Amino acid sequence: MMLYYTLTSFFKPTMKKFPSEFEDLLNANGKRILNSKQYPSNFTKKGAIPIEVVNNIIDQDVAAKCIAILDKTVYAKLKPISSKINPNELWGMKKNYTERLSKNLRMKTMEIGGPKSRSYEAAQACGLIQMLNSESLRKFGEVVASTRFGTAENNQVICYESGDYVSPHNDHHPENENVKNGFFDIHLMFSNRHVEHQLLVHEQNGYLNQCYNISQPAAMAIYKLPFWHYTTPLIAKPGKEKMARRWLLLRSFELSK
């Protein structure tokens, strides 16, 4: 009998796909937040930028299983995107202190398209679509934001590797009728053990000086955009530059009507 318990505790079952409900990833603290009537966040603080990063909601071993699924089923489907600094933004200046920097970035990503797209098929096969579409994911975001979300807008997968980043930007889309007055983002984030750190920096009282450590094994960020923010370059642990990855699973919602 002792041998049986030893073996079963050693050979823990693997998670081959994401659960259909986000709630099934949560630990006790995460479920407590999900089932609470109100969560004290920046969304309820007068004058605060509407963003909240929530840690300690998914256990580290569960986060490792989620990363393994993404590495195995999604990573090969990602496309690298980058936008370098235009040299003309420097040498095209005619007056001192008139510099302007357009949004630039480097990362790998996959927009999850319609049901007939390859990206949708890959995301559905590993359970990612079902989990991102789950009612408990929406509810968790609504509890933290202390408001109801509107129609789901889109899903996206992003992977940051060593040196990847996004420069200051605001995510304002005045040409898009459905989100020109703002929208909500839910970012479910997983960092593997080779990541040293990566920061999310956002504006507060006109300064880009508010920081969150977003390189925890698992965390969630809820935003009401637009506002100015950026993501610092991902720093890998020494000698682990080729293995460090931070995954970001993104779901956007329109404002409630």
Image (spheres, rainbow, N blue to C red):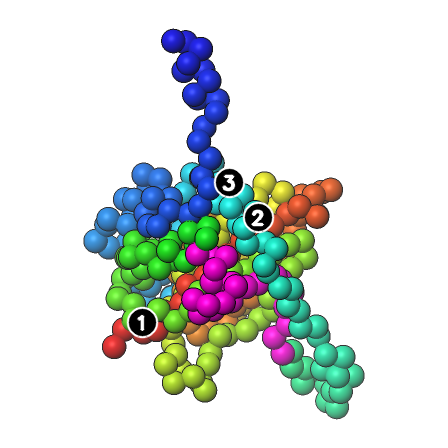
CA–CA distance in space, label 3 to label 2: 10 Å
**Residue at the disc numbered 1:** 151
| Helix, strand or loop for disc 2 | helix
Q: Is residue 49 visible?
A: no
Query: How far is mark 3 from mark 1, CA to CA?
Result: 31 Å
Between 242 and 40, the one lying in front of the other is: 242
Dot placed on the residue nearer the N-terminal end, 3 or 1: 3
Above-or-below relation of 206 to 249? below
Residue type indicated by callout 1: Thr
Instruction: Spot the residue most to the left.
Output: 37
**Which quadrant would residue 100 be assigned to in this image?**
bottom right
- Residue at the spot x=66%, y=69% of the render? 82
Q: Look at 74% across and 87% down and name the residue there.
A: 93
Mark 3 element type: helix
Image coords of residue 8 (percent x, y): 43, 21
Label 3 CA crowd tier, 10 Å (few <14, some 14–19, many 20+): some
Magenta residues (range): 102-124
> What residue is pinned by disc 3?
64
Mark 3 vs mark 2: in front: 2
Q: Identify the residue at horizontal 35%, vertical 69% (top origin).
A: 152
Badge 1: few (under 14), some or many (20 or more) residues near its Cα, within 10 Å?
A: few
Kind of residue at badge 3:
Ala
